[in-house]
Amino acid sequence: MESVGVRLKKIRLEKGLSLEEVHKKTKVHLSILKAIEEDSLVNFSPVYIKGFLKIYANFLKVDPKDYIAGYKNPQSLSYPGKSAQEKPPASFLSGTYFRLGSLKSMSKKISLLAAIILALVFLWIFLWIGLFKLGKAIFNRQSISVKKPKVIVMAPAKISSPSPAAEITPKEQKPPVKPAAVRLGIVARENCWIEVKVDGRTIFKSKLLKGMMESWEAKEKIELSLGNAGVVDLNVNGQHISTVGKKGQTVKNILINKEGLTIKR
């Protein structure tokens, strides 16, 4: 059976659409669209994967339910600094324990152990470089132009005034549905210092390296400060925001709640 990504790609090709055209219409990053079609969308929580699939399916005019349920979320990549090879080295060392015991000379034992440690160090370095290049290929395909923002407020679109014949009384109007929780996702195109407060409590205050992604969820609000605002992509309550500042610019007092995103001055 064909995967969800392959099926969506076939539908796009049948409609004669390129990924660039889909990107311009949906505002979804090219690398994310390509990852969806290759069934290799990584480092995203199920909430954001579901959101990207829904946007793509709606654009292709197919029912998102037929594709979201069948999409297989691949295992997330390890970030640089995490030891992704803890079990293999342990297994390898345990397998060499008996070979070391069979050596007659203590000098041979020391030489063999040093060779094993050196091999593991080189293996870890090669894996780290491979993961770094893979993250760069997915999240750093093209540079995005930025403009200096003043105040960005994301709110539900206003409803145009109806004609007199179709006028709705105040009792019939319904308030916009607010999300149950506040969600924020960040993808770093280059290194960026970030501070995140969730419901008033600081939970992240460090540098987010190039190609990495993090996400948080709050009940009421998320407060965000960026040290290099022009090099990150934000996903606020399921809506994509390409930039909130210039490259190298420090932007503080970014408030994210159920109403949207606001930059306080």
Image (cartoon, helix red, strand yellow):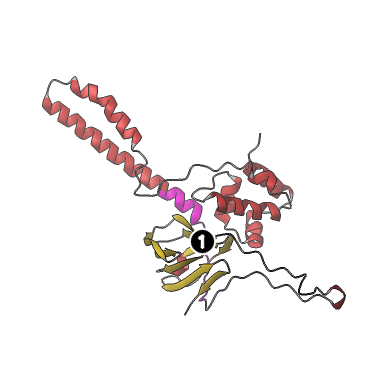
Magenta extent: 132-149
Q: Quadrant of residue 77?
A: top left
Residue 244 position, x and y percent, is 50, 70
Q: Is residue 181 above or below residue 38?
A: below
Residue 207 position, x and y percent, is 37, 61
Q: Quadrant of residue 209?
A: bottom left
Q: Is residue 237 above or below residue 84?
A: below
Can residue 192 be seen by looking at this rendering?
A: no
Residue 143 position, x and y percent, is 51, 63
Nearest to the observer: residue 101 or residue 66:
66
User: In the rendered image, which residue does mark 1 sit on?
Assistant: 219
**Horizontal placement of 120 versus 195: left or right?**
left
Residue 86 position, x and y percent, is 33, 38
Local secondary structure at mark 1: loop
Q: Is residue 13 above or below residue 194?
A: above
**Horizontal placement of 193 versus 103: left or right?**
right
Instruction: Find out whether residue 97 is within the magenta segment.
Output: no
Nearest to the observer: residue 156 or residue 186:
156
Q: Residue furthest left?
A: 106
Amino acid found under the numbered disc labelled 1:
Lys
